[in-house]
C-alpha cells in the first residue's frame, strides 16, 4: 500500500489506525423508506406495504366517486324495500365521499412511510369493510371485492407495523 492510500483510508486500515467511523469515511448501507435494506428480509413486507398504500389510494378515489355519484344522481343506487339497514342515499353519498378522501390521503402518507398513517389505514380499512358489508345487497360482487381488498390492507399494514417495531 502506498502512503496516499493510508492517508485517505482506502486500501487497508484507515489513516493513523483509526476506524472508518472515526475518519468520517463510514457510510450507512442503502435503506429504503421502511428502514430495511434493499432485498433483505423486509423487502416483501415493504412491497406489501407499498401495495397496501396504493390500494388505499385507489380505494379512496373509487369511494370518492361512488359517493359523488350518490350525491349527484340519487336514483343510480336502488333502495331495497325489505332490507334491514335503510339508508338515505344522499347522506350515504356524503359519508362515502368524505371517507374516500381521508382513505386516499392516508394511503399517500403510508407510501411516505408514516407509522401513524398505517394505524389510521387499519382503522379506515375496518370501517370500509363494515360499510361494504352493509352495501352487499346493492352491489354484491363489488362489495365482496372491496372487503377482500380491505382485509389485505389490514394484514399488510399490521404486519409492517409489527415487524418494524421488533426490528
Image (spheres, rainbow, N blue to C red):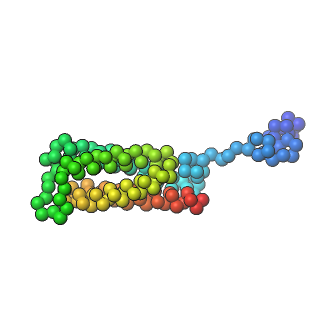
Q: Quadrant of the N terminus?
A: top right
Q: Quadrant of the C terminus?
A: bottom right
Q: Residue at x 55, y 57 (%)?
A: 164
Q: Residue at x 13, y 58 (%)?
A: 80
Q: Measured from the top left, where is residue 118 in percent x and y?
A: 46, 53
Whether 89 is drawn above or below 167: the answer is above
**Outermost residue toward the top in this view:** 4
Q: Is residue 66 visible?
A: no
Q: Tell me: 76 left or right of 120.
A: left
Whether 99 is drawn above or below 84: the answer is above
Q: Tell me: 118 left or right of 28.
A: left
Q: Nearer the viewer, residue 26 or 75?
A: 75
Whether 88 is drawn above or below 10: the answer is below
Q: Residue at x 50, y 52 (%)?
A: 115
Q: Residue at x 24, y 43 (%)?
A: 68
Q: Measured from the top left, where is residue 30 in percent x and y?
A: 62, 45
Q: Measured from the top left, where is residue 162 in percent x and y?
A: 52, 61
Total marks placed = 0
Q: Is residue 19 visible?
A: yes
Q: Measured from the top left, where is residue 9 in percent x and y?
A: 81, 40
Q: Tell me: 140 left or right of 81.
A: right
Q: Nearer the viewer, residue 153 or 80?
A: 80
Amino acid at each position: 500500500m502506498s502512503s496516499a492510500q493510508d492517508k485517505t483510508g482506502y486500501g487497508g486500515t484507515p489513516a493513523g489506525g483509526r476506524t472508518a467511523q472515526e475518519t468520517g469515511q463510514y457510510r450507512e448501507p442503502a435503506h429504503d423508506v421502511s428502514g430495511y435494506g434493499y432485498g433483505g428480509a423486509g423487502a416483501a413486507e415493504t412491497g406489501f406495504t407499498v401495495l397496501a398504500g396504493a390500494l388505499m389510494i385507489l380505494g379512496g378515489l373509487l369511494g370518492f366517486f361512488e359517493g359523488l355519484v350518490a350525491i349527484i344522481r340519487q336514483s343510480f343506487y336502488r333502495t331495497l324495500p325489505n332490507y334491514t339497514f335503510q339508508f338515505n342515499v344522499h347522506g350515504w353519498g356524503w359519508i362515502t365521499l368524505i371517507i374516500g378522501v381521508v382513505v386516499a390521503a392516508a394511503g399517500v402518507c403510508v407510501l411516505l412511510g408514516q407509522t401513524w398513517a398505517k394505524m389510521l389505514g387499519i382503522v379506515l380499512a375496518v370501517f370500509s369493510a363494515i360499510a361494504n358489508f352493509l352495501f352487499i345487497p346493492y352491489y354484491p360482487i363489488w362489495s365482496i371485492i372491496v372487503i377482500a381488498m380491505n382485509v389485505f390492507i389490514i394484514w399488510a399494514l399490521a404486519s409492517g407495523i409489527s415487524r418494524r417495531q421488533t426490528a
